[in-house]
Image (tube, rainbow, N blue to C red):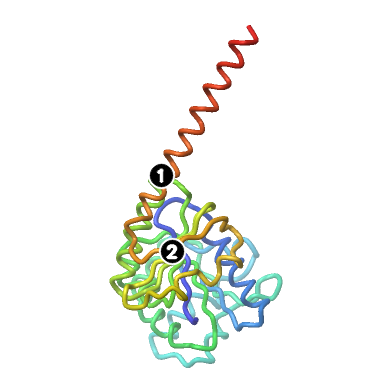
Amino acid sequence: MSLICFASGKGAPGVTLTALGFAAARATAGRKVVLLEADRSGGTLAVRYQLPRQPGLITLAAAGRHGLSRDELWNHAQELPGGLAAIVAPEREDRTSAILRSDGQRLGRWLADISDIDVVADCGRIDSDAVSSGIPSQADTLYLLARPTAEDIQPSAALAAAALDQGISVSWFSSETSLTIQPRSQASPASRSPPCSQTIGVVHKRCSMVGPTAVASAAASRERSHHSRTNRRTYCQRRTKSCLR
């Protein structure tokens, strides 16, 4: 892998925390890893760890306009507590979104060509435009995170469809289930399991699919099951109170 993107279609299901944990786990396993903040709403790591805003995404984008060599990547990274290298983004939404709109696809293409370094990109909440023309458009794998409800998963299904159209391998994660979605030309039984499901540590059940249409229906089924259990529990509580009167 080289460019691995984490994102969500709705809400805040913990994309930054998951990307950070995944990058740290890959580094611990002996891989060369850089964490890239590419969230259009602005970065958080510089504020969280009291780091300067440069070097970071600002300097990387500026250097990229004049051509980048492979070794220059480290010049734009800073060290987080624990030793993980990170390319931080400015916390202001207007500055970060402007950089990603103008330079995202070009940077993504360059990062994807670095085969011996894992670039783990925290893309935050994205839309179909980011999938078609932003950093995620160049991803080797796009991991979509969502809370396990139909209304949160449905936007991820639409993003998965857009990514599949571009030949990007997609995995979806919630706190209950993981789904790996591959373009039909790439799908095979051996390649459908997400390689990082155990690393992330949030997957309790796993199932595979080749198309995105089952995502929302699976979530809707869990919703119906949840409401059924809730209704039974409420009924039993009422019966118990009635018997105690």
Q: Position of residue 79 (x, y in %)?
A: 65, 76
The answer to which of 55 and 141 lies nearer the viewer is 141
- The residue identified by callout 1 is 221
Q: Secondary structure at mark 1?
A: helix
Badge 2 is on which residue?
Answer: 208
Q: Alpha-carbon distance for marks 2 and 1?
A: 16 Å
Can you give x and y, in whole percent of width and height, for residue 189 in the image?
Answer: 44, 73
Image quadrant in which you'd find residue 164: bottom left
Residue at 55 percent across and 78 percent down: it is 55
Precedes in sequence: disc 2 or disc 1 = 2
Relative image position of residue 111 (x, y in whole percent): 45, 83
State the residue at coordinates (56%, 85%).
75
Q: Amino acid at mark 1?
A: Ser
Quarter-of-image position of residue 185: bottom left
User: What count of labels does the image hold?
Assistant: 2
Do the residues under discs 2 and 1 have CB atoms within 8 angstroms? no
* Left or right for 127, reference 61: left
